[in-house]
């Protein structure tokens, strides 16, 4: 998915998603000049956050 779509799903800004990608907290792939985030990577990221907080997904 596009960075903008990931930002919408996470309810954060585009630059925050790019920061997560830069910090390697959110894996991504580059296709040509486009940055894409696999849906599985987004799910894994949210799962890691949930486990770190010790709670269930909302």
Image (cartoon, helix red, strand yellow):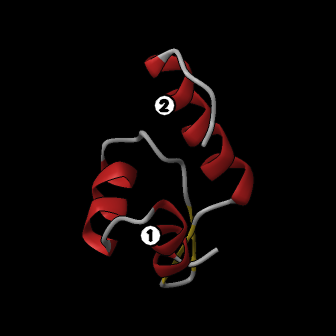
Relative placement, left or right, of 35 versus 22 is right
Q: How far apart are marks 1 and 2 (CA)?
A: 16 Å
Residue 27: x %, y % from top left: 54, 48
The residue sitting at 53% across, 68% down in the picture is 6
Residue 3: x %, y % from top left: 48, 74
Residue 39: x %, y % from top left: 71, 59
Give the total number of marks visible in the rendering.
2
The answer to which of 13 and 2 lies nearer the viewer is: 13
Q: Quadrant of residue 50?
A: top right
Where disc 2 sits, the SS reads: helix
Q: Examine the rendered structure and indicate whether residue 17 appears above or below residue 33.
A: above
Residue 53: x %, y % from top left: 44, 20
Relative placement, left or right, of 2 versus 33 is right
Q: In which quarter of the image is residue 32?
A: bottom right
The residue sitting at 48% across, 31% down in the picture is 49
Q: Pointer 2: what residue?
A: 49
Q: Pointer 1: what residue?
A: 7
The residue sitting at 61% across, 51% down in the picture is 42
Mark before the other along the chain sequence, 1 or 2: 1
Q: Residues within 10 Å of mark 2 (few under 14, many from 20)?
A: some
Say which quadrant the N terminus sits in: bottom right
Where disc 1 sits, the SS reads: helix
């Amino acid at each position: 998915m596009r960075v903008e779509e990931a930002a919408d799903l996470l309810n954060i800004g585009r630059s925050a998603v790019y920061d997560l990608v830069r910090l390697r907290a959110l894996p991504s792939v580059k296709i040509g000049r486009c940055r894409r985030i696999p849906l599985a990577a987004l799910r894994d990221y949210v799962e890691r956050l949930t486990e770190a907080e010790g709670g269930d997904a909302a």
